[in-house]
Every structure is written in C-alpha cells, then in structure tokens.
C-alpha cells in the first residue's frame, strides 16, 4: 500500500508517494537524494541517520515516512547556504578535526543543532548527554564535543548572551 506524503524538506515543500512501511530514512535517501542521512544500524541505535523533525532530532531509520505528513524536516544538506557555504557547525567540525571517516558526522551535527540554537550555555556533560544517541567508531568524542562547544559559544556571543 502506498500513500502520498506532504512535508517540507530543507525549506522546500515536497510531495512523496511512499510505501506505508518505508522509513523516513528510505524516503530521504531514495526520493530526496539526501545522502547525508546515513544508513547505519537500521534499529535506531547509532544515530547516523539523525535528522531534525520540527526542530527536534530523530533517528530516521525507525521513523515511518508516513509520520512525516505536514512536518518540517531538515538534513545536513539543509545547513548549507544557497551559495554552497557550510554552516558554522559544519565548519567547526572541520576546524576541530571532529571528523575522520565522516560517516557519523551528519548525525552528530544534526543532534547538535538544538544545543547551538539554544539561548543558554550547555556544559560539556550536558552536550555529551545530548549526543549520547550517536556512535562514532573513528574519532575520540573530545573533538566532537569541542566543535559543538565552540559553535555554541560563538552563537551565544553573537546574541550578546556570553562574553
């Protein structure tokens, strides 16, 4: 059985015709060609497929595509501006050396978005809790936390909330 789904993906209104058993991961990779959404464990434990749904991080491998009806979905492709410039969090992951193979990176970045968008400073321990659903086989988590912390502090300074 198939169903039409209407949602916004990376700021663009979209319509998909999906098998009702399909995951959001399958819809995004197959129909939207959002290849930053990685197919990792397929049981919601590694975080490689993390996307934002209405501003909150979700693992898309266990989120049914039909649940996306009317939702606002963002993948890391949506963080790049129209001129191809990477976002500050993407740049921070590069400058801090928080990537090695890169497979898990988009999921970590999407999990970090609520942290860096908040009007408060999260501690390193709180950041670690926010990203606890993401697994990396290559890097030490230190550089990932550094990149998130650096971006959060930059944004708070820009808002005048941190000196």
Image (cartoon, helix red, strand yellow):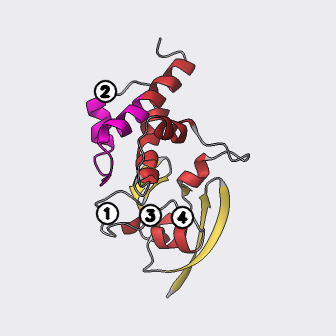
Badge 1 or badge 2: first in the primary sequence? 1
- Left or right placement of residue 119 versus residue 124 in this view: right
Along the line of sight, which residue is nearer the eye, 145 or 8? 145
Report the mark closest to the observer, 1 or 4. Answer: 4
Residue for badge 4: 35
> Is there CB contact under 8 Å for labels 1 and 2?
no
Q: In the image, is residue 88 above or below residue 131?
A: above
- Left or right placement of residue 31 versus residue 137 in this view: right
Distance from Cα at disc 2 to Cα at disc 3: 28 Å
Report the mark closest to the observer, 2 or 4. Answer: 4
- Left or right placement of residue 86 versus residue 46 in this view: right
Find numbered disc 4 in the image and state the secondary structure of the residue it sits on. loop
Find numbered disc 3 in the image and state the secondary structure of the residue it sits on. loop
- Which of the labelled discs sits on residue 38, or is there none? 3
Q: Which residues are magenta?
A: 123-149
Residue 127 in the magenta stretch? The answer is yes
> Is there CB contact under 8 Å for labels 1 and 4?
no
Badge 1 or badge 4: first in the primary sequence? 4
Report the mark closest to the observer, 1 or 3. Answer: 3
Q: Position of residue 92 (x, y in %)?
A: 49, 35
Residue for badge 2: 123
Badge 2 or badge 4: first in the primary sequence? 4
């Amino acid at each position: 059985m198939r169903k039409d789904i209407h949602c916004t993906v990376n700021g663009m209104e979209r319509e998909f015709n999906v098998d009702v058993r399909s995951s959001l991961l399958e819809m995004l990779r197959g129909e939207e060609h959002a290849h930053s959404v990685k197919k990792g464990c397929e049981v919601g434990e590694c975080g490689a497929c993390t996307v934002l749904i209405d501003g909150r991080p979700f693992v898309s491998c266990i989120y049914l595509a039909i649940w996306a009806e009317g939702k606002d979905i963002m993948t890391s492709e949506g963080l790049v501006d129209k001129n191809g410039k990477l976002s500050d969090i993407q740049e921070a992951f590069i400058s801090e050396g928080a990537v090695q193979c890169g497979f898990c990176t988009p999921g970590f970045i999407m999990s970090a978005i609520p942290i860096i968008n908040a009007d408060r400073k999260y501690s390193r321990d709180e950041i670690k809790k926010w990203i606890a659903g993401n697994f990396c086989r290559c890097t030490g988590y230190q550089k990932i936390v550094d990149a998130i912390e650096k971006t959060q502090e930059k944004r708070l300074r820009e808002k005048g909330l941190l000196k």
